[in-house]
Image (spheres, grey):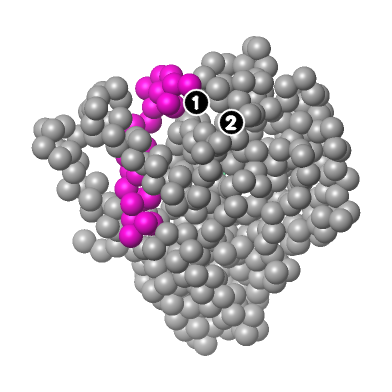
Amino acid sequence: MTRAYNFCAGPAILPESVLQQARDEMLDWRGTGMSVMEMSHRSDEFVEIAETAEQDFRELAGVPDDYAVLFMQGGASSQFATIPLNLLGDRSSADYVNTGIWSKKAIAEASRYANVNVVASSEGNGFTTIPDPSDWQCDPTAAYLHYTPNETIGGLEFDFVPDAGSVPLVADMSSTILSRPLDVSRFGVIYAGAQKNIGPSGLVVVVVRKDLLGHARKDIPTMMDYKVTADNGSMYNTPSTYSWYLAGLVFQWLKSQGGVESIGRINARKAEKLYGYIDQSAFYANPITPRFRSWMNVPFTLADEGLNRAFLDGAEQRQLLNLKGHRSVGGMRASIYNAMPEAGVDALIDYMTVFERERA
Ligand SMILES: *Cc1c(COP(=O)(O)O)cnc(C)c1O
């Protein structure tokens, strides 16, 4: 068996030891004679798996007691509607920052339910920078302020948490959650699709400040109501049990790595190495303002676009997979989430060096 270095943006690489443990426990979870997939979600065994996962996540992310942690379904995209339906309350408008494709999707969906006020946008410069917060046109009466801390496709990442005053701050952290320490108390809602830093796709982890529960629109689908979800321990219906279990294994792995501070140092080093290499090369380029370059998703272009196919073919031969950039951006993209070992980044840089020497 060979394990490749998988640079996919999502579903993404998982820690090898997590997959091994899942394999070992596949047919018989700790002497129960059952796979986790076959267990009742109401069983003592599964409730323990679920509660441990939540506890470990709380510990890793530093979630205060006045926040609920929900394990919901439908991915991050379902939250684009779930958020306005839960948070608008008696207000009609919400503020959004537009920094890329995921921001735009969130804005488009919210516009079906709310008057969306785009307070700032970096679309004019191709989403290569974060608009200066002193220029944002925020509405102090908005129901909430939504932003995307890391734009997975563009590789653009905030290096600060916006100050929303008393307006609840809502963040789509799908591709940056648990990648470094975080002050949860600055946020009203944090949500993250699992398939980047947490586990299998379909699952979405939502962190909600408890005072924001219970203000949903009356006609909200029951399954989308944060309060119903919280009151039922994320088991109003059958949750995505196996994904929850796997997320729990990833949380345990992350704790064994020393938690988010330790992984944050490694992530910073991985990103610094790769951008450092790109910047010293005349052949590879990244267009993002250095301060706002993503630690998790590193897009880059080749000086000769005609060599893209050859670059990808050569990478595949070395088991460096899924480096093709998003169709809207072109070029290449290396996603280097928590589970990507530093050796994977080194292997990529080695290959880029050889390719440049031989083909540029
Ligand atoms: C991947 C991603 C999404 C979409 O996640 P789904 O689970 O496919 O809905 C949304 N926002 C960001 C920032 C992402 O990286």
Measured as percent of width and height from the top left, residue 219 is found at 64, 12
In the shown orientation, is residue 157 left or right of residue 192?
right
Q: Quadrant of residue 187?
A: top right
Residue at which label 2 appears: 210
Measured as percent of width and height from the top left, residue 100 is found at 71, 50
| Label at residue 186 | none
Depth check: give the residue in front, 296 or 230.
230
Depth check: give the residue in front, 97 or 7.
97
Q: Quadrant of residue 181?
A: bottom right
Query: Is residue 244 one of those drawn in magenta?
Result: yes
**Viewer can see residue 347:** yes
Depth check: give the residue in front, 120 or 168.
168
Residue neighbourhood size for the residue with mark 1, other residues' Cα within 10 Å, grouped as few (<14), some (14–19), many (≥20):
some
In the shown orientation, is residue 65 left or right of residue 244?
right
Query: Is residue 52 one of those drawn in magenta?
Result: no
Label 2 vs 1, first from the N-terminus: 2
**With respect to residue 348, does 142 lie above or below?**
above
**With respect to residue 274, does 33 lie above or below?**
above
Q: How many marks?
A: 2
Quick one: quadrant of the N terminus? bottom left
**Viewer can see residue 335:** no
Measured as percent of width and height from the top left, residue 188 is found at 65, 38
**Distance from the alpha carbon under mark 2 to that under mark 1:** 9 Å
Residue at which label 1 appears: 230
Q: Are marks 2 and 1 in contact (CB under 8 Å)?
A: yes
**With respect to residue 70, does 227 lie above or below?**
above
Q: Residue at x 74, y 62 (%)?
A: 128
Q: Which residues are magenta?
A: 231-256
Q: Amino acid at mark 1?
A: Ala
Q: Helix, strand, or loop for circle 1?
A: helix
Mark nearer the viewer, 2 or 1: 2
